Amino acid sequence: MNTKQTTPSAIGFRLALVIPALALSLTACKKPAGSEAPAAPPVAKEQNSRDAKPVVTTESKAPALATSNPPTTALVFRNVRSWRRKVDFEDVLTDLGYKFDVRSSTEMAGTDLTPYGFVIIPGAQWQDDYYRHYAENAARFDRYVTNGGTLVLELNGAERDGIPLPRGVSMVSHGATDNVITLPDHPMLTPLAGRTIHANYASHGYLEGVPKDAIVLVTEMEEPKPTFIEYACGSGRVIAACQCFHDQDGSGRGPLMPTVISYAAEREWYSPKK
């Protein structure tokens, strides 16, 4: 694992091409009324397969060991498009030129995680058993990270499920309209220039059980409860945010999606100034 002081220029070139393309709309970042699911989920995009079909595994429990492919190969576990947003992780991964596969939550138990440099858990997957499937396979994700993988969690939408994260971190449901950026020079946050994140809600919860060596990136404004963190776990990394990475509500969070993807892919981990 490479750990060094990272500057915004490390990922600036890619982001300069992608951030202006992020779509805006007037939809607020709230769960829709009732239990109606969004429109049909996006078709799985697989850059390594012409037919874009799921990989058929012969074992019900595939091993989750150290990563073997370059960290620019990503895996997205998704059942539905998050928040009905026009720009989602798959779109940004494509624009940034990263290879990726998409799997449903029912495939968490049987998917071999070893080929992937980073795995994305997108937000707003509460319509079915997605978070139950994640919790059932939490030990596999823990092993994946411990052995060198990077786990990216957009937790906005998972606040009612209390899913377990590596090293005992969990999310507590608590809506906050304002979040404060504590490390504005972090590569994932530089496009926001230290501005307060304001939305309804800016974060749907906060994280507890945060390791002492974790990097706290964003907190609630009223109380300094962490809502966006980064921390090491074995040989790997966890990036967990209680925000949603879009700008549909005019909150200015849209640039977070490409910066988070680029940061996870490049693996040049930030070291706070002492």
Image (spheres, rainbow, N blue to C red):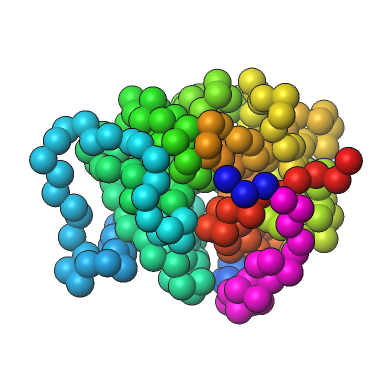
Quarter assignment of residue 57: top left
Q: Position of residue 33 (x, y in %)?
A: 47, 42
Q: Decide whether residue 15 is among the magenta residues.
A: yes
Q: Decide whether residue 211 is among the magenta residues.
A: no
Residue depicted at x 48% and y 53%: 83
Q: Nearer the viewer, residue 264 or 45?
A: 264
**Residue 23 drawn above or below residue 226:** below
Quarter assignment of residue 136: top left
Q: Is 35 left or right of 269, judged from the image as shown?
A: left
Task: Determine the main secondary structure of the stretch shown in magenta.
Answer: helix
Residue depicted at x 38% and y 55%: 69
Span colored in magenta: 4-21
Q: Is 64 left or right of 205, judged from the image as shown?
A: left
Q: Which of 69 and 165 is in front in this view?
A: 69
Which quarter of the rendering shows the C terminus? top right
Q: Where is residue 46 in the image (x, y as percent from the top left)?
A: 29, 64
Residue depicted at x 14% and y 49%: 56
Does the rendering let one see residue 80?
no
Which quarter of the rendering shows the N terminus? top right
Does the rendering let one see residue 55?
yes
